[in-house]
Amino acid sequence: MSYQTVGKPLPRIEGVDKVTGKTQYAADVPVDGLLWGKVLRSPVPHARIVHIDTEKAKNLPGVRAVLTGSDMPSVYVGSRMKDMPVLAQDRARFVGEPVAAVAAEDREIAEEAVNLIGAEYEELPAVYDPEEALRSGAPVLHADRSRYKNAPPVPEGIPNLQSYMVWKNGDLDAGFQRAYRIFEHTFRTQLTHHGYLEPHASIVRIDPGGRIEVWASNKGPYELRDRLAEEIGVPKEKIKVHIMSVGGDFGGKASLIDVPICYFLAERTGRPVKLVLEYSEELMAAAHRHPGIITLRTGVERDGTLTAIHAKIVFGGGAYAAFKINPQVTVLGGRRLASYYRVPAIHVDTYCAYTNQVPCTQTRTPGSPQVVFAAESQMDIIARELGIDPVELRRRNLLADGDLSPMGEKWQHIRVRETFERAVKASGWGKSRPGENCGRGVALYERGAPTGKASAAITLEKDGTVTVLTGCPDVGPGFYTIVQQIVSETLGAPPKLVRVRFEDTDSLPYDPGTGGSKSTNTSGHAAYKAAREVRERLLGVAARKLACRPEDVRQVRGRYAGAKGKGVSFAELARETVAESGGAIHHLTMYEPQDNPPVTSFAVQVAEVEVDVDTGQARVKKITTAHDSGVVLNKLTYQGQVDGGVINGLGLALMEETPIVEGRIVTLNLGEFKMPSIKDIPKLNTILLESPTGPVPYQGKAVAELPNVPTAAAIANAICDAVGVRIYELPLAAEKIYWGLRVGGRPAR
């Protein structure tokens, strides 16, 4: 189908303000009478707090409040499970945990005051490895986790268990009995930070009537409002959260983090309080991606056909579960294990453990990069053991239309085989070797588009101007441009007449925020529904003008045309419709999905890697990524999401890590915490398989979180193909490859 606006590479409507510095972020908001907040953080990974001396800090000129856990009500916070005190009450459980907070007239005084607080600790035994944390005799971080609100049930007798989930389908025993060979391997992935540019920032103001206003770097303003209301015990109607532009998220900005601290400081001082993290605090104390230990036991027939998979996944959850947003308080990656293959029987046990490290949260497809690194690495191991080409082994196991997924889901329009073949062909697989000590590796991923309720409003003015009001914050992927295109296409209005606006949580009933690759399928659907309702008004007026039935009116190149070919422009129609209404037309709409279409999306990547056999350094030369994309609503923003996701995955694969030594993260600045730079970016080749099969408006499919998932596995497989070294632990650092070469690596050709 040919569209006028949808599918066009329109530039981002918020781009000019960003590059010219006009975009306002939470830390930029001017508020009269503002105080600066600052937090004293624990220097030890596990300790009883013996005493905190705040007298010197309180007596410093310019200090307006100093709070410790003993000054606070017994408030425990969390996105779901409420297990984290606002300030440590009697025990500190990770280096960086908030222990005390100050509010002062300026930032420098606040920093000086924090340095004047004296804290005495009695250190306790600590545990950092999640498997060790679950063993009998491990130091216990939370004596009775069941007392915390929304704590999910867990098996008895396992210490430090944050959560436990099982996903299963089919007869596992029968699958393994049928197997010709059974393979078992264990893989590890690292603790790492999200790497967003803007640090967390928050401002809280309480007016004399008790009305609370919040400005925060947060991707879910309505959820922030509701959680804060629950935790401080006030009606949500008394809280207004201003929707802000967010300077990057990748999953890390869904929690309250320091907003409750700002609230209690504002309550104590009677003045608004701002708290902005330094980046060293981000790396030390803001929630990270879960490290994982994934053990896979996989059965195959003689020809490599999969018969059964049993997975044990252990994630390090950190000192608190408070930053996990899903109701099960777990990491969901395991439920999509091998979801693009035919697997007759599967059983996935997922454990999340309390450990004395920074708490963890969702990070771009939570758990999936970890799980896919393990599963797709093992597929290559199996292929080489059986003497089958890794591409051919995958071909034999790919889902076809009509197949059930491993977990028993029945999807429509399964396009994984076409996506796979396009990626393999474009990469040059099997045609020629890419060079000496060079190799290719392939990996896959599958993910659908989550949905949920959302609201939007559209205002149509007499001059044809259309304003879309959304509650979804901008975190960088270009969602506002997509909304502009959806509304423009639906109304037949030129894009230049459509603007997108956001305000606060008072302006609309609800929005789920961004994240989970869902914005276009939730907030975008709400805007689409509102636009369709406005279009109904326009069609009625057009039908009278054109002497035909409303159902006979067609939109053609920005005009509303009747059966006899006569037409009227959008601008003229808007003018008459608004005139008939006696003023601007305003439609507020709540979108609530009825049935989620049973469709999903597939991504396939092939990495081409060169290894320096003298140093072990791996250089990624090229990544080919193919996407089952549905209809691409904006090719420019879509390509940006693909490129950004691939490089995000490359960072996880090769360099990103926040290592802990004696409980302390040792990469506390962006010089030591390595992320990909322009010199690390390889040649990127994207292939899109477009089809009108998606669930989002105009048949689009989710893209944001697909490209980053297969990358690490594809690179690991390419390294093995190049020099015969199999790395079972991320990141794929040069020293690991170097020592692998010294103990038996060889070209795997």
Image (cartoon, grey):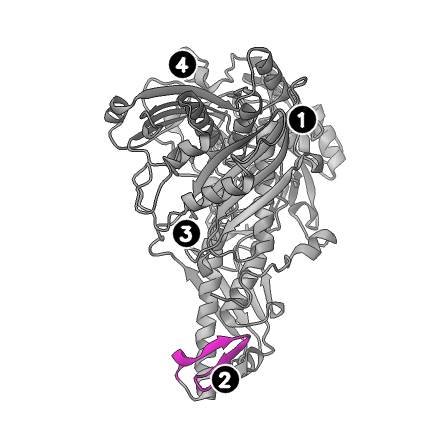
**Above or below, comparing residue 532 to residue 282 in the picture:** below
Kindly indicate the quadrant of the structure image that contains residue 80.
top left
N-terminal of the two: label 3 or label 1? 3
Label 1 belongs to which residue? 668
Determine whether the residue tagged by mark 3 lies in a helix, strand or loop.
loop
N-terminal of the two: label 4 or label 3? 4
N-terminal of the two: label 3 or label 2? 3
Q: Is residue 329 visible?
A: no
Q: What's the residue at 46%, 87% (across, down)? A: 546
Q: CA distance from mark 3 to mark 1?
A: 37 Å
Label 2 belongs to which residue? 580
Label 4 belongs to which residue? 135
Q: What's the residue at 51%, 12% (across, down)? A: 125
The magenta segment is 549-566
Label 3 belongs to which residue? 452
Determine whether the residue tagged by mark 1 lies in a helix, strand or loop.
loop
